[in-house]
Amino acid sequence: MRFTDIFVRRPVLASVVSLLILVLGLRSLATLPVLQYPRTQNAVVTVMTSYFGADPATVAGFVTTPLENAIAQANGIDYLTSTSQIGVSTITANLRLNYDSGKALTEISTKIDSVLNQLPQAVQRPVITVKIGQTTDAMYIGFNSDILTPSQVTDYLIRVVQPRLQSVPGVQTAELIGGKTFALRAWLDPVKLAAYGLTASEVAASLQSNDYIAGLGSTKGQWVQVNLSASTSLHSLEEFRNLVVKQVNGANVKLRDVANVTLGADDYESSVSFDGKQAVYIGILVAPNANLLDVVKGVKDAYPDIVKALPQGLNSEIVYDTTNFVNSSIDEVIHTLIEAVLIVTAVVFVFLGSWRSVLIPIMAIPLSLIGALTFLLAFGFSINLLTLLALVLAIGLVVDDAIIVVENVNRHLGEGLTPVDAALLAARELAGPIIAMTIVLIAVYVPIGFQGGLTGALFVEFAFTLAAAVTVSGIVALTLSPVSCALALKPPKRGDETLESRIVGFIDARMDAVRDRYHRLLDSSLNYVPVTLVFGGLVLASIYWLYAS
């Protein structure tokens, strides 16, 4: 007894296997993350170095170039990019896919430490950050006001809005874009500096020396202990204005004497706008293992409460949301999937002619596609454009096995066998070919997933999704399809003039005519073997020409 006989003789067992595939697939569908593209383990290391007052050429020559040469020696870097702006050097190291970001971060930090003594003394220590996974923000929220200054808006966002957004599950960072943090601005007057014999460096040194905090220890009394600290830091704008910079001829030169001291923003070099007004954005960066759609939904759920708590005069709006594009793209693919199922159903009916015969392969389509989702969950994949595209392409593959089972059972029914005997014989005859077809298709598609680089990272899910769908279709064709044929198909009745029998008779007559013509062409080609070989050679030779052009 062949193993296929077990399922034909025990329909309940075949039903349980199919239900198990269906339940596992539906459970996987509810668990799988939904993304726009397959998840790639890419990381970006950013090195930002400040050199206050230096022009871009100086920053590039004395900061960016030495650091870039040192960072380039670290392992795991795919390529480097750098920018040199007024007072700031930014170097971005894009790591190779799936390279250990922690290892790369350690190497880059070591390389930077080795060249710190080559940098100008006034250069601040480089700040190294790493971003893993998605490196672009999934959503931008804009804030602007006609009443509040950009610095006041930034201060509120840092204190209230940013912590609230970062508490949403799956948010890696809620970063400010175009923020204007409060800072003391001392606009030096070169004429007054020259009059007092001062330089900008002396003013900066005076400010640094008056911003000192130290712990001195503690003093004990009989009942109490008091911690002591020394602080020369300045706290108010008036204190900064009255800061003594230098003594000239016995007179104190204060900061207000050589500069216009105001409370402004720490940066005036860049700004962002929204609806023609200066604004501050908050960009939402999704964590590497988080579901993009769930994270954005969580942010949108929290957004109404944030808007209600905004100060009077502060306006907000979601200005960019990537999930709109993701959802529309996925909807398009799902519509294509539904259309493909309907078209396959129509084509199968045209060639089989019986709704009973059509129902069996059509049942295999959703079962195979849903069952493939179990493999996606097991492999750590996601539902994205490429896996959905693979499911669309798999429709034409998963239906083939069921069609040949139905056609073989119908052939045996025409020979006078009972439905059960016809299903047993057909399953025995086709077990080997179906297994061979499944293995061949898997062998064709799986190697696509072993490519290297970005192509391999993107198409690994595409390839394994196709292989999974074909595997499940082979299981369904050897378990559920024979049982369904034994229960649903009936032997043809002589003289039966029902609508279904007339449709089947019409289709069979047309197919017989096509088969007879094919037989005649085949006989003719076999009688003229040299001509056939020459024709085949021309077709093969044209492949190179078509490929080259």
Image (spheres, rainbow, N blue to C red):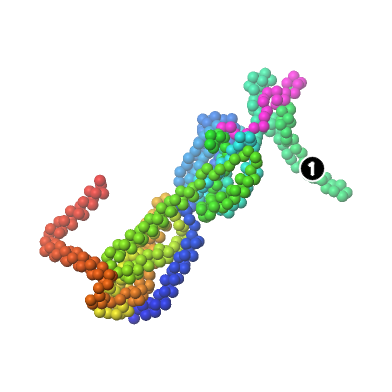
Label 1: how many Cα within 10 Å (few below 14, some 14–19, many 20+): few
What's the residue at 18%, 53% (across, down)? 538
What's the residue at 61%, 51% (across, down)? 167
Quarter of the picture containing the N terminus is bottom left
Give the camera-side residue of 37 and 328.
Answer: 328
**Residue 328 part of the magenta segment:** no
Task: Tell which residue pokes out farthest to the right in this image.
Answer: 222
User: Residue 23 appears at what percent x and percent y?
Assistant: 47, 68
Taking the image as drawn, is residue 436 in sight? no
What's the residue at 48%, 60% (across, down)? 32
What's the residue at 84%, 47% (across, down)? 220
Q: From which residue to which does the magenta span run? A: 248-269
Task: Say if 314 sits above or below 432 in the image.
Answer: above
Q: In this view, does 92 lie to the left or right of 349?
A: right
Q: In this view, does 23 lie to the left or right of 440?
A: right
Report the residue marked by disc 1: 228
Taking the image as drawn, is residue 472 in sight? yes
Q: How many labels does the image show?
A: 1
Q: Mark 1 is on which residue type?
A: Leu
Give the image quarter of residue 2: bottom left
